[in-house]
Image: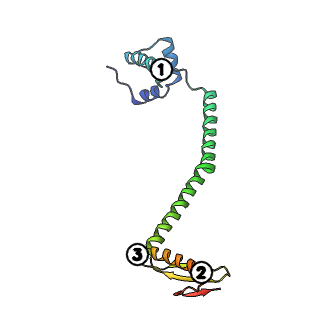
């Protein structure tokens, strides 16, 4: 059994030293563990692993990868800025409007706040009435419209506005 220091195993895992790779190409290995590791490295290098059996780092490939990653980041930032962020802001705006609508309707119904019903005659005279309840406000609107259509002055109005 041969004990190896930890740094040799780490160095072999991350590509190894140049001196070690030259020795492995010649086939001149002094101990049994190195021969076994060469067999393991050959098995993993064929399957795409990084066992240290490859010829090393290629700068041309790295530059191409860096440029592609750079352009991908620029494209992702542009997509976020001009598409995703506006859609997100529109969705947030719609949610705020819907929440305010629901809160307003619930407040009017629960707190019995009156609805303002307004009708305008043909001659331009406006009549305003405040009515409690949704259905009562709809009925009052219809009554005001009918009385103005017939030419009568509506009764029970708060203040005629001019």
From the image, tell me which residue sits under label 3. Answer: 110
Residue positioned 59% across, 83% down in the render: 127
User: In the shown orientation, is residue 58 left or right of residue 96?
Assistant: right
Task: Tell me, for residue 150, which label it has, or none.
Answer: 2
Q: Quarter of the image containing the C terminus?
A: bottom right
Q: Earlier in the sequence, mark 3 or mark 2?
A: 3
Q: Secondary structure at mark 2?
A: helix
Residue positioned 50% across, 12% down in the render: 26
**Position of residue 130 measured from the top left corner of the image (x, y, whole percent):** 51, 82
> Which residue is most to the left?
1
Question: In this picture, is 133 found above or below 4?
Answer: below
**Position of residue 28 measured from the top left corner of the image (x, y, whole percent):** 46, 12
The crowding category of the residue bearing disc 2, from other C-alpha atoms within 10 Å (few below 14, some 14 to 19, many at least 20), is: few
Q: Secondary structure at mark 3?
A: helix
Q: Earlier in the sequence, mark 2 or mark 1?
A: 1
How far apart marks 1 and 3 lie (CA) works out to 73 Å
Q: Quadrant of residue 90?
A: bottom right
Q: Quadrant of residue 62?
A: top right
Q: Secondary structure at mark 1?
A: helix
From the image, tell me which residue sits under label 1. Answer: 45
Q: Nearer the viewer, residue 144 or 13?
A: 144
> Are discs 3 and 2 less than 8 Å apart at CB?
no
- For the residues carrying marks 3 and 2, which lies nearer the camera in this image? 2
The crowding category of the residue bearing disc 1, from other C-alpha atoms within 10 Å (few below 14, some 14 to 19, many at least 20), is: some
User: In the shown orientation, is residue 24 left or right of residue 31?
Assistant: right
Q: Quarter of the image containing the N terminus?
A: top left
């Amino acid at each position: 059994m041969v004990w190896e220091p930890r740094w040799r195993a780490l160095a072999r895992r991350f590509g190894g030293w140049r001196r070690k790779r030259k020795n492995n190409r010649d086939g001149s290995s002094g101990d049994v563990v190195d021969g076994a590791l060469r067999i393991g490295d050959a098995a993993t290098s064929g399957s795409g692993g990084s066992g240290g059996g490859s010829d090393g780092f290629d700068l041309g490939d790295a530059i191409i990868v860096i440029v592609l990653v750079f352009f991908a980041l620029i494209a992702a930032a542009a997509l976020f800025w001009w598409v995703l962020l506006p859609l997100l802001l529109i969705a947030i705006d719609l949610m705020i409007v819907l929440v305010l609508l629901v809160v307003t309707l619930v407040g009017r119904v629960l707190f019995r706040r009156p609805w303002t019903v307004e009708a305008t005659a043909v001659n331009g005279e406006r009549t305003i009435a405040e009515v409690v309840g949704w259905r009562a406000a709809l009925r009052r609107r219809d009554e005001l419209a009918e009385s103005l259509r017939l030419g009568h002055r509506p009764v029970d109005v708060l203040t005629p506005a001019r």
